[in-house]
């Protein structure tokens, strides 16, 4: 591999001058800089990033740790990559399949200085274990956690879910069936809290219609429609954990000749790309803004600067399913 000494010799300059010209740090006359760049191109020079990392103590790489690649994750990844690239960083993806051992591999990459920081989308490991690695570099979570050493860029799902419930009430729906995600997650618990407060506010019976838990796929939505038919049409609206469940409800309803919203209304959550195609009323969840906040926190800690974060907001997107 070509080294700095060879480039300096061909360009007729000192190795230190060649190094400054290639790194862009320090003064080099324009004439000498062009000679160095020409020599580097002729010798097909590429910097040894591992050597640069050892010298500077920084890889300018951020690890994104995620269980699997889903559409919300793709939005978060796009937002994080965009923010990183704008500031000279790259993003390395660690796919774990919710395997705690693979999460430790990502943490060890941070300890070995293969990445400068980690962003966890979701994890299975004990939070205390993850916190032990903060001494090696910043760690930020998208998953909702509360820990003094690990900032989280979560949004309070209570607020978004209450938007959906208030909209359904305003449209005249009273027998609302909640389709929740995993009940052990703080986000789901916040949605349950929102529904309880909603029922108290409007003096509604929270048990008037059964709720579903641990449902997050389109197939779950299809099954819920069949349950609805088999049990005397108990709900006049569905508030869904995400747009995928809502899409399954809408698709199965159409296959069975049911009408949305005449037979029942459907409100999703996320505002994914396919939501407009289904005319799906949903809650816009600004994932890209959360990713930008995650990068701002990481860059602030790596570079010891103060970068602002911007509180994102949920927004109701009203379409034809309500």
Image (spheres, rainbow, N blue to C red):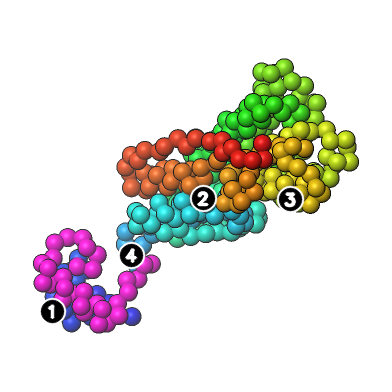
Image quarter in which the N terminus is found: bottom left
Mark before the other along the chain sequence, 1 or 3: 1
Q: Which mark, by number, is residue 251?
A: 3
Tell whether label 3 touches label 1 (CB within 8 Å).
Answer: no
Q: Which is nearer the eye, 83 or 97?
A: 83
210 relative to 43, above or below = above
Q: Which residue is mark 2?
A: 76
- Residue at 84% of width from left, 36% of height from top? 233
Q: Is residue 220 visible?
A: no
Mark before the other along the chain sequence, 4 or 1: 1
Tell whether label 2 touches label 4 (CB within 8 Å).
Answer: no
How far is mark 2 from mark 3, CA to CA?
A: 27 Å
Callout 1: helix, strand or loop?
loop
Q: Which mark, by number, is residue 12?
A: 1
Which-is-in-front pick, marks 4 and 3?
3
Q: Which residue is mark 4?
A: 52
Q: Main secondary structure of the magenta part?
A: helix
- Looking at the image, residue 226 sits to the left or right of residue 72; the answer is right
Mark before the other along the chain sequence, 1 or 2: 1
Mark before the other along the chain sequence, 4 or 2: 4
Residue 232 % position (x, y): 88, 35
Q: Which mark, by number, is residue 259?
A: none
- The verdict on residue 35 being magenta is yes
Mark before the other along the chain sequence, 2 or 3: 2
| 10 Å crowding of disc 2: few (<14), some (14-19), many (20+) | many
Region of the chain picked out in magenta, as a range: 21-50
- Residue at 48% of width from left, 54% of height from top? 78
- To which quarter of the image does residue 259 belong? top right
Which-is-in-front pick, marks 2 and 3?
3
């Amino acid at each position: 591999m070509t080294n700095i000494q060879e480039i300096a010799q061909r360009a007729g300059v000192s190795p230190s001058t060649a190094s400054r010209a290639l790194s862009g740090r320090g003064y080099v006359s324009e004439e000498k800089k062009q000679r160095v760049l020409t020599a580097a191109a002729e010798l097909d020079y590429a910097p040894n990033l591992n050597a640069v990392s050892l010298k500077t103590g920084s890889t300018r790489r951020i690890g994104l740790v995620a269980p699997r690649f889903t559409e919300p994750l793709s939005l978060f990844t796009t937002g994080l990559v965009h923010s990183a690239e704008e500031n000279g960083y790259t993003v390395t993806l660690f796919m774990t399949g919710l395997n705690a051992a693979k999460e430790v591999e990502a943490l060890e990459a941070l300890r070995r200085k293969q990445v400068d920081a980690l962003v966890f989308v979701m994890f299975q490991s004990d939070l205390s274990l993850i916190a032990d690695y903060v001494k090696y570099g910043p760690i930020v979570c998208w998953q909702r956690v509360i820990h003094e050493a690990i900032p989280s860029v979560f949004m309070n799902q209570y607020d978004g879910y209450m938007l959906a419930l208030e909209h359904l009430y305003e449209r005249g729906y009273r027998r609302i069936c909640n389709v929740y995600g995993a009940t052990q997650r703080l986000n789901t618990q916040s949605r349950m809290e929102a529904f309880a407060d909603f029922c108290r506010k409007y003096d509604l019976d929270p048990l008037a219609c059964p709720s579903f838990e641990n449902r997050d796929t389109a197939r779950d939505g299809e099954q819920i429609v069949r349950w609805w038919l088999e049990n005397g049409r108990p709900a006049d609206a569905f508030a869904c954990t995400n747009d995928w469940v809502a899409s399954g409800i809408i698709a199965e309803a159409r296959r069975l000749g049911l009408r949305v919203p005449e037979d029942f209304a459907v409100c999703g959550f996320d505002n994914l790309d396919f939501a407009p195609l289904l005319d799906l009323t949903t809650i816009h969840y600004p994932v890209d803004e959360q990713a930008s906040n995650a990068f701002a926190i990481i860059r602030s800690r790596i570079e010891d600067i103060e970068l602002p974060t911007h509180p994102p907001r949920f927004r109701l997107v009203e379409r034809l399913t309500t």
